[in-house]
Amino acid sequence: MALDNSRDKPLPLGRVIGLTRDWVGRLGEVWVDAQVVEIKRRSAPTQFLTFRDRVADMSVSVTVSAMVLDAAGPLPEGSRVTARVKPRVWDRNTSLTFECLEIQVAGEGRLLAQLEQLKRKLQAEGLFDPVRKRRLPVVPRMIGLVTGKDSDAERDVVTNVARRWPAARIRTRHALVQGPNSAESVMLALGALDEDPEVDVIVIARGGGSLEDLLSFSDEGLVRAVAAASTPVVSAIGHERDSPILDLVADVRASTPTDAAKRIVPDHAVEAAAVAEATRRLLRAVEVRITEAQRQLDQLRGRPVMVDPTSAFAAHYDRLSLLRHKLDAAVDRRIRDEESLLRSAVSSIRALSPKRTLERGYAVLVDDDHGSVSSVADTGPGARIHAYLADGQLDLDVIATQGDQK
């Protein structure tokens, strides 16, 4: 609608802004296809986005409630979205903004959002916990390989395993690695190898591809099958930048099929060199130990006690002789002292002996009853007494008794 205005009859700016606001308002709600290039989250209920046209170099500010934004699920910057918006012109600064009433992730972004939701679900169940990861065997007896038939991934794994460890054995189960039935096909191959008692490790390998090509390796059923497997599983899907959910639940993630071969078997040349080096160091250690033991033995053999074992007894012999001499002298001295004491005792005994008294002219008197007669009162006239002398006995008759004149 044309406005009646001229240089001589200009319209007030506020009226023009109001008319513009009304014109934009009559556009109503509209669905747009755009790309989210910036997300500004705040604690307030209203959030701010920046939409950009996917072809033309145009962008616009968008306001959205936190509830609508959260309902869209994970929304990383760069996602393609389909949004229901309502344009609006603000009176104060005449800026054109859009109010987003509904937003959905579209195209690859939608797939990413769905995968992100599945990741969060499986992570909450603990399927990605590091404690669940199992260690790979150092040298597996049998390697199970799940891959596409005649694929580059199969050739990379087989060739590099044979190059690194020629004695390695590989048991391959071919499966579909792309398409609607690929996840089920991989699960069947995985189950067959997991039940094989000879298989020590399983490698699931596929070459690179788009997000849609690798989508089957983020299938929830396949992820749970890998988590439930009793055999360690190595994920070797795509290239370094590819990261299906299988990488998170597998025991080991290999960036490429070639990297998987490096992780499951050691390098024969490196291990042989390590064994040779360890052998050399062991022999050197044994030689050093023997040399040290020989040196200690030579030192022991060179000691005087080992050269002449009896030399240590010479000083003891001299001391023993001296002690024997002292002992003999002490015994002799003790014997002489005891002999002297004995002679003195004998002399004293002999001096007090009744026999010695008798030899000096004294006699011992007894009556007929052999009672001692030591006083005149012990006998009387007419009694017979006996006198014991030094050289014999006298039988005497008492004629008279005479007491002490005192």
Image (cartoon, grey):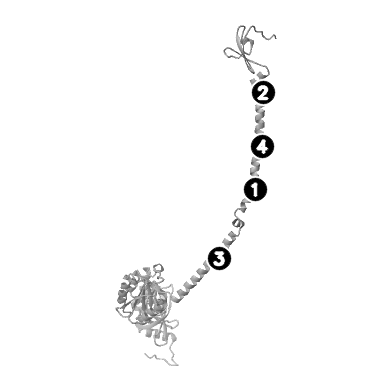
Left or right of 384: which side holds 101?
left
Can residue 294 be seen here? The reply is: yes
Q: Which residue is mark 4?
A: 333
- Mark closer to the chain start, 2 or 3: 3
Q: How many C-alpha atoms fall within 10 Å of the one at disc 4: few (<14), some, or many (≥20)?
A: few
The residues tagged by marks 3 and 1 sit, at their Cα atoms, a distance apart of 41 Å
Q: Which residue is mark 1?
A: 318
Quarter placement of the C terminus: top right
Amino acid at dot 3: Thr
Amino acid at dot 4: Arg
Q: Position of residue 29 (x, y in %)?
A: 34, 82
- Mark closer to the chain start, 1 or 2: 1
The residue nearer to you, when weighing 84 against 262, is 262
Q: Position of residue 295 (x, y in %)?
A: 58, 63
Q: Which residue is mark 3?
A: 291
Residue extending farthest to the front is 391
Q: Are marks 3 and 1 in contact (CB under 8 Å)?
A: no
Q: Residue at x 65, y 32 (%)?
A: 339
The residues tagged by marks 1 and 2 sit, at their Cα atoms, a distance apart of 49 Å
The residues tagged by marks 2 and 3 sit, at their Cα atoms, a distance apart of 88 Å
Numbered disc in front, either 4 or 3 = 4
- Mark closer to the chain start, 3 or 1: 3
State whether residue 79 is above or below residue 337: below
Q: Position of residue 255 (x, y in %)?
A: 41, 77
Q: Which residue is mark 2?
A: 351
Numbered disc in front, either 3 or 1 = 1
Of helix, strand and loop, which one carries label 2?
helix
Q: Are marks 2 and 4 in contact (CB under 8 Å)?
A: no
Numbered disc in front, either 2 or 3 = 2
Q: Position of residue 267 (x, y in %)?
A: 44, 76
